[in-house]
Image (cartoon, rainbow, N blue to C red):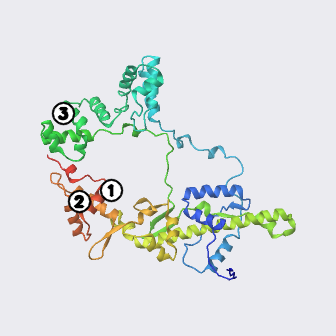
């Protein structure tokens, strides 16, 4: 039985992910600070790139034909200039003042070690105490067992316990505890408030207090509801993480807004924060070499042409990133105008797909352009994704974002009678009166996300 062979011609389409396309996608996703770091690396590696001293920006982008966009690219690449920083050393008058410098914050371990060095009575106590301090976590809790530390230091267990009690008397009160209960007991003792009822509540009824089961605690301990409530109020003044007021030893991360929306004379203005990156231009010297073929050998010319293509693609990618972010924020400003005017309570539900359809882009492009970016608004600095919120709809078709619902819940709770706190069902009814139809379970979900305790925990008896 023979096999038949045939030759056919088919036409197919497939997307080839080139290196330039990967670079453009990567640049689109970069936050401002990472973009500036990336540009700095490219400036070091590509001799055809430099920063222009001219900090002027093109007019805000609008939808325009591709030919006009390419013309703008050509116009932008016409100029070139030296790097904007001075070539010589800074003058004495330009030196920064000493008061502009800040020292590194003291960590918890450094603070406690300083205290223990003046508290320890012997070299052995100093050695054991510093070892214990080294085993505290960033919140001040001891995460190593006493027996384990005794074996590591080759000392009796009772000496570890004796030094540990000394560490627990240091400031801030509560450090060196091995559990939440011990932490609270140490603080209550330091304040002179460790009465027998307080001790019993801390040791056995913290969960009941958190769940608002004050009647059960009062019944078990033979106390009045007012007495249990007073104990709960006192415990809430204690710090469950006494070490958090000190630095963790990690570098503080600052948020650099990627885009700002400012109100100028009653109108909002959008500013994309990529000033340094947008000042990239081509070096005039190397451009002249490329314009005169005889001034460099073929290998040099090929190298410069390769770097020229890389430079042009980078500049185009950065400009496309700016345009994309600008157009997205334009839509956000139009769709979320009430938020920009009045605050989070007026945030409306909005999806990536809705914005993508309005600006004629794919949803994945909008997703990449808004990832890991922050926006500065008259209402504060928010993640750009914050303006894309899920929401709920009423029977009449009106919508409210989840964040605005949480704000309403917080307002209702702030105005409630603490002796008769609002239940989740009552909160749902109040939202319904505002035209927001949600179930009791949805209210409970939003309440928990807003860190609002349940009605039992909010109830007061006096």
Question: Horizontally, is 159 left or right of 185 in the view?
Answer: right
> Quick one: label 1 or label 3, which is nearer the N terminus?
3
Label 3 CA crowd tier, 10 Å (few <14, some 14–19, many 20+): some
Up the image or down, 251 lies above or below 391; here it is: above
Of labels 2 and 1, earlier in sequence is: 2
The residue lying toward the viewer, choosing from 366 and 52, is 366
Q: Helix or strand or loop: what does disc 1 sit on? A: helix
Q: CA distance from mark 2 to mark 1?
A: 16 Å
Residue drawn at x 70%, y 61% as measured from the top left: 49
Picture coordinates of residue 403, whole percent (x, y) = 34, 62
Which residue is tagged 3? 197
Image position of 243 (left or right of 413) = right
- With 445 as the anchor, is 254 left or right in this view? right
Q: Position of residue 135 (x, y in %)?
A: 44, 32
Instruction: Determine which of the numbered discs, if any, sits on residue 412 in the image.
Output: 2
- Name the residue at 40% across, 26% down: 147
Q: Nearer the viewer, residue 343 or 399?
A: 399
Q: Position of residue 91 (x, y in %)?
A: 66, 45
> Which of pointers 2 and 3 lies earlier in the amino acid sequence?
3
Residue placed most toward the observer, 312 or 278: 312
Mark 2 → mark 3, Cα distance in angstroms: 34 Å
Q: Which residue is mark 1?
A: 449
Callouts 1 and 3 close, C-beta under 8 Å: no
Q: Residues within 10 Å of mark 2 (few under 14, many from 20)?
A: some
Res 50 quadrant in image: bottom right
**Mark 1 residue crowding within 10 angstroms, few (<14) / some (14–19) / many (20+):** few
**Local secondary structure at mark 3:** helix
């Amino acid at each position: 039985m023979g096999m038949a062979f045939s030759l056919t011609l088919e036409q197919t389409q497939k997307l080839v992910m080139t290196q330039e396309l990967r670079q453009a996608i990567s640049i689109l996703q970069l936050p401002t600070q990472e973009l500036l770091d990336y540009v700095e690396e490219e400036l070091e590696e590509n001799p055809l790139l430099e920063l222009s001293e001219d900090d002027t920006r093109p007019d805000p982008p609008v939808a325009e034909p591709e030919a006009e966009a390419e013309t703008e690219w050509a116009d932008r690449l016409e100029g070139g200039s030296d790097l904007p920083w001075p070539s010589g050393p800074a003058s004495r008058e330009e030196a920064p003042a000493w008061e502009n410098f800040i020292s590194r914050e003291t960590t918890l371990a450094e603070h406690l070690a300083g205290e223990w060095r003046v508290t320890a009575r012997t070299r052995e106590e100093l050695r054991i105490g510093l070892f214990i301090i080294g085993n505290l976590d960033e919140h001040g809790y001891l995460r190593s067992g006493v027996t384990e530390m005794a074996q590591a230091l080759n000392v009796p267990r009772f000496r570890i316990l004796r030094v540990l009690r000394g560490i627990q008397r240091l400031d801030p009160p509560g450090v060196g505890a091995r559990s939440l209960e011990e932490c609270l007991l140490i603080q209550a003792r330091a304040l002179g408030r460790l009465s027998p009822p307080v001790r019993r509540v801390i040791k056995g009824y913290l969960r009941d207090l958190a769940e608002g089961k004050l009647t059960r605690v009062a019944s078990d301990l033979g106390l009045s509801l007012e007495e249990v409530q007073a104990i709960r109020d006192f415990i809430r003044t204690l710090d469950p993480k006494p070490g958090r007021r000190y630095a963790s030893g990690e570098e503080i991360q600052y948020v650099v807004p990627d885009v700002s929306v400012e109100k100028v004379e009653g109108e909002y203005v959008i500013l994309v924060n990529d000033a340094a990156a947008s000042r990239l231009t081509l070096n005039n010297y190397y451009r002249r070499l490329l314009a005169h073929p005889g001034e460099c050998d073929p290998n040099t010319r090929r190298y410069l042409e390769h770097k020229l293509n890389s430079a042009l693609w980078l500049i185009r990618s950065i400009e496309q990133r700016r345009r994309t972010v600008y157009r997205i924020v334009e839509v956000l400003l139009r769709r979320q105008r009430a938020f920009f005017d009045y605050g989070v309570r007026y945030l409306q539900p909005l999806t990536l797909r809705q914005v993508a359809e309005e600006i004629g882009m794919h949803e994945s492009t909008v997703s990449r352009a808004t990832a890991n970016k922050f926006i500065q608004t008259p209402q504060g600095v928010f993640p750009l994704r914050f303006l894309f919120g899920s929401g709920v709809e009423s029977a009449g078709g009106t919508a409210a974002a989840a964040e605005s619902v949480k704000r309403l819940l917080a307002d209702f709770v702030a105005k409630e009678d603490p002796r008769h706190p609002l239940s989740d069902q009552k909160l749902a009814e109040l939202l319904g009166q505002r035209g927001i139809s949600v179930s009791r379970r949805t209210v409970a979900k939003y309440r928990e996300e807003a860190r609002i305790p349940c009605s039992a925990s909010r109830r007061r008896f006096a």
